[in-house]
């Protein structure tokens, strides 16, 4: 029993998890050189460490903008406005009518040089849709051709539930920090099994080298307890040090048991050459999605890029699908979507999160298809249908 050595990640664990990430994140894309992996206490720690180290090293400062591909996991919305960062948010909004993909007009916002960081969850959380091959290419073109200085964070936790998944980590290797967690795919939430991956040739180290001499001297003092050559510490190893206030660098990252569990999961994924586990996991999620939709009274509909892990019940659209556009307009005008979640909790003891907390425009509810039994998803669907039917009765009596 000992502290993990090296502190970033156990040597063989990094090799095995790295091979797993290459298999799951690159698809048919070629690998652009080696990349390093930092074992973290879940994806939540990864998010925290990235923002901390960007700020500590002067790569972002108050007033710099952060672009978010919205809708997005709510902490990405809540971290930038904190006083220690004070970074205005620019929405790069996915279009629901285009199966939650980016338009060229939205991507053009990334041309703003004041935007220093672009964060995206792919597949999205919610509405659980991966970037299409075309959208992925268009995002990559903006970054590679127009914003080669942009820092990109791609949170690909749900990529293993998608068909033919390719990450921005593969398309924009120099710009992209990849965040991945084993917890969702392997049903190990609470274990805190996450990683940050970064290619050895990257813009983060390039930006460190371009800092002013005064800033470099300040950072020399920050990292002087670790080495006599602090300027040689790479960005990913600064993530490791900053995660433990530098002085506790030797106790950074995930514990040895966590790393061994990660390694076992990664080996399971590498050895499953016929994708039996992956197919079973995707099949389970999609079966629950069909159950939800059927009990809402609508035929199940799935687009090619849908992943279905965190689908949204768009109450406005559901109203229209069930009873027509005129009723949907009345439903929105009378704000009938707002009490849906409270009624659901009171009458069925099922709690769902509102889409508004994830920057979803329409009244909606986010459903996780990983947590409940099929019978409970049937109950949620039937309740949604019941509530909208009651509102339709009210509509017809006016």
Image (tube, helix red, strand yellow):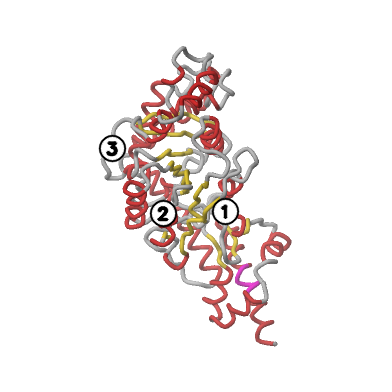
Residue visible at 45% across and 42% down in the picture: 153
Question: For the residue carrying disc 2, how many other residues have a C-alpha within 10 Å: few (<14), some (14-19), or many (20+)?
Answer: many
Mark 2 or 1: in front is: 2
Mark 3 vs mark 2, CA separation in Å: 20 Å
In terms of secondary structure, where does tag 3 sit?
loop
**161 and 113: which is toward the camera:** 113
The residue where tag 1 is placed is 373
Q: How far apart are marks 2 and 1 (CA)?
A: 25 Å
Q: Marks 3 and 1: in contact by CB < 8 Å?
A: no
Residue 31: mark in rendering: 3
Dot 2 corresponds to which residue?
130
Mark 1 to mark 3 CA distance (whole Å)? 39 Å
Q: Between disc 3 and disc 2, whose residue precedes?
A: 3
Boundaries of the magenta span: 384-388
**Residue placed most toward the observer, 164 or 47:** 47
- Badges 2 and 1: C-beta atoms under 8 Å apart? no
Callout 2 secondary element: loop
- Secondary structure under the numbered disc 1 in the rendered image: loop
Q: Is residue 288 above or below residue 13?
A: below
Q: Position of residue 112 (x, y in %)?
A: 44, 52
């Amino acid at each position: 029993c000992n502290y993990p050595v090296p502190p970033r990640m156990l040597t063989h664990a990094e090799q095995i998890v790295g091979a797993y990430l290459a298999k799951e994140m690159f698809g048919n894309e070629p690998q652009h050189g080696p990349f390093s992996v930092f074992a973290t206490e879940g994806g939540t720690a990864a998010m925290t460490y990235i923002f901390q180290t960007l700020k500590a090293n002067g790569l972002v400062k108050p007033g710099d903008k952060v672009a978010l591909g919205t809708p997005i996991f709510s902490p990405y919305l809540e971290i930038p406005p904190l006083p220690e960062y004070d970074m205005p948010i620019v929405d790069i909004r996915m279009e629901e009518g285009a199966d939650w993909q980016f338009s060229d007009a939205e991507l053009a916002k990334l041309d703003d040089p004041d935007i220093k960081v672009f964060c995206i969850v792919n597949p999205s959380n919610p509405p659980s849709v991966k970037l299409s091959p075309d959208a992925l290419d268009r995002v990559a073109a903006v970054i590679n051709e127009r914003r080669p200085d942009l820092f990109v964070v791609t949170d690909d936790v749900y990529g293993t539930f998608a068909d033919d998944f390719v990450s921005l980590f593969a398309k924009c290797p120099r710009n992209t920090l990849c965040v991945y967690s084993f917890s969702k795919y392997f049903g190990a939430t609470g274990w805190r099994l996450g990683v940050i991956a970064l290619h050895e040739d990257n813009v983060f180290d390039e930006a460190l080298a371009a800092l002013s001499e005064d800033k470099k001297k300040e950072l020399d003092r920050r990292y002087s307890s670790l080495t006599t050559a602090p300027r040689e510490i790479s960005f990913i190893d600064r993530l490791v040090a900053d995660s433990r206030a530098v002085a506790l660098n030797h106790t950074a990252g995930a514990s040895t048991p966590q790393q061994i569990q990660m390694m076992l999961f990664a080996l399971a994924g590498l050895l499953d050459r016929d994708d039996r586990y992956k197919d079973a996991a995707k099949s389970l999620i999609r079966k629950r999605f069909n159950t939800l939709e059927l009990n809402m009274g609508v035929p199940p509909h799935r687009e090619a890029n849908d992943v279905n892990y965190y689908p949204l019940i768009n109450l406005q659209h559901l109203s229209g699908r069930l009873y027509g556009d005129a009723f949907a307009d009345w439903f929105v005008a009378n704000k009938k979507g707002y009490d849906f979640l409270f009624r659901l909790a009171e009458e069925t003891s099922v709690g769902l999160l509102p889409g508004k907390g994830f920057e979803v425009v329409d009244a909606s509810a986010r459903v996780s298809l990983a947590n409940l039994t099929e019978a409970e998803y049937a109950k949620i669907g039937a309740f949604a249908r019941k509530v909208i039917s009651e509102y339709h009765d009210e509509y017809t009596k006016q």
